[in-house]
Image: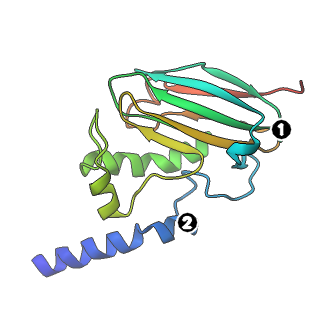
């Protein structure tokens, strides 16, 4: 029985390798540099502005961010809460596709409510290092730089299990000014 389990585990790690995710088989959970309606990773040196975002228990501050199509924004994201939180630029469909991965990370011990176990994530090939997203422990700060595409239904959310369902979601509002 053990060789069978080892073979399944080995297959799972191979399927979950970073190369597979980079190739786009991540079910749309994150942006992988594709030029899509939501935009693409931006160059921090060319950012039009920096927006500070605070994550607390089940809330973002600000909860709505105005951007212009084509604008490059650096988000300075700080986890001011007591739990692990994610800032993920995307659409409802992207978040739904990403939900299973986040649940698996929690269920397999790659993260707990208040800690990210990077060593376990690396072993499983699930690094959570996409350009449109950061996963932060309490007190951590990271940056996401994004060049926005056309006007689209876009927002930001925390996809840690239960957080988005509890209201941890924000809106991107496209403006012409």
Whether residue 88 can be seen here:
no
Give whichever of 134, 28 is nearer the camera: 134
Quadrant occupied by the C terminus: top right
Residue 153: where, in percent of width, then height?
Answer: 72, 36
Q: How is the image coloured?
A: rainbow
- Judge left or right: residue 83 versus residue 98: left
Residue that numbered label 2 is attached to: 22
Q: Are marks 2 and 1 in contact (CB under 8 Å)?
A: no
| Residue at image coords 50%, 71% | 19
Residue 4 lies in what quarter of the image?
bottom left
- Judge left or right: residue 77 versus residue 56: right
- Judge left or right: residue 45 versus residue 121: right
Residue that numbered label 1 is attached to: 69
Residue 155: where, in percent of width, then height?
Answer: 64, 33
Q: Secondary structure at mark 1?
A: loop
Whether residue 56 can be seen here:
yes
Residue 59: where, in percent of width, then height?
Answer: 49, 20
Give whichever of 113, 93 is nearer the camera: 113
- Judge left or right: residue 78 versus residue 12: right
* Disc on the earlier residue, 2 or 1: 2
| Residue at image coords 62%, 33% | 75
Quadrant occupied by the N terminus: bottom left
Real-space Cα separation, disc 2 to disc 1, in angstroms:
25 Å
Q: Residues within 10 Å of mark 2 (few under 14, many from 20)?
A: few
| Residue at image coords 76%, 48% | 37
Q: Residue furthest front?
A: 45
For residue 31, the mark is none
Q: Secondary structure at mark 2?
A: helix
């Amino acid at each position: 029985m053990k060789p069978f389990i080892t073979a399944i585990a080995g297959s799972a790690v191979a399927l979950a390798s970073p190369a597979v995710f980079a190739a786009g088989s991540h079910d749309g959970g994150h942006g992988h540099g594709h030029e899509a309606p939501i935009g693409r990773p931006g160059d921090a040196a060319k950012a039009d502005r920096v927006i500070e975002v605070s994550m607390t228990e089940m809330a973002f501050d600000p909860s709505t961010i105005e951007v212009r199509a084509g604008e490059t924004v650096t988000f300075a994201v700080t986890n001011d809460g007591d739990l692990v939180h994610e800032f993920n630029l995307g659409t409802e469909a992207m978040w739904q596709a990403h939900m299973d991965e986040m649940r698996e990370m929690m269920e397999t011990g790659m993260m707990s409510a208040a800690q990210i176990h990077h060593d376990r994530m690396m072993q499983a090939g699930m690094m959570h290092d996409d350009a449109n997203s950061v996963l932060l422990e309490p007190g951590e700060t990271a940056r996401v730089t994004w060049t926005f595409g056309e006007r689209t239904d876009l927002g930001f959310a925390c996809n840690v299990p239960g957080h988005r369902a509890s209201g941890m979601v924000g809106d991107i509002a496209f403006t012409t000014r």
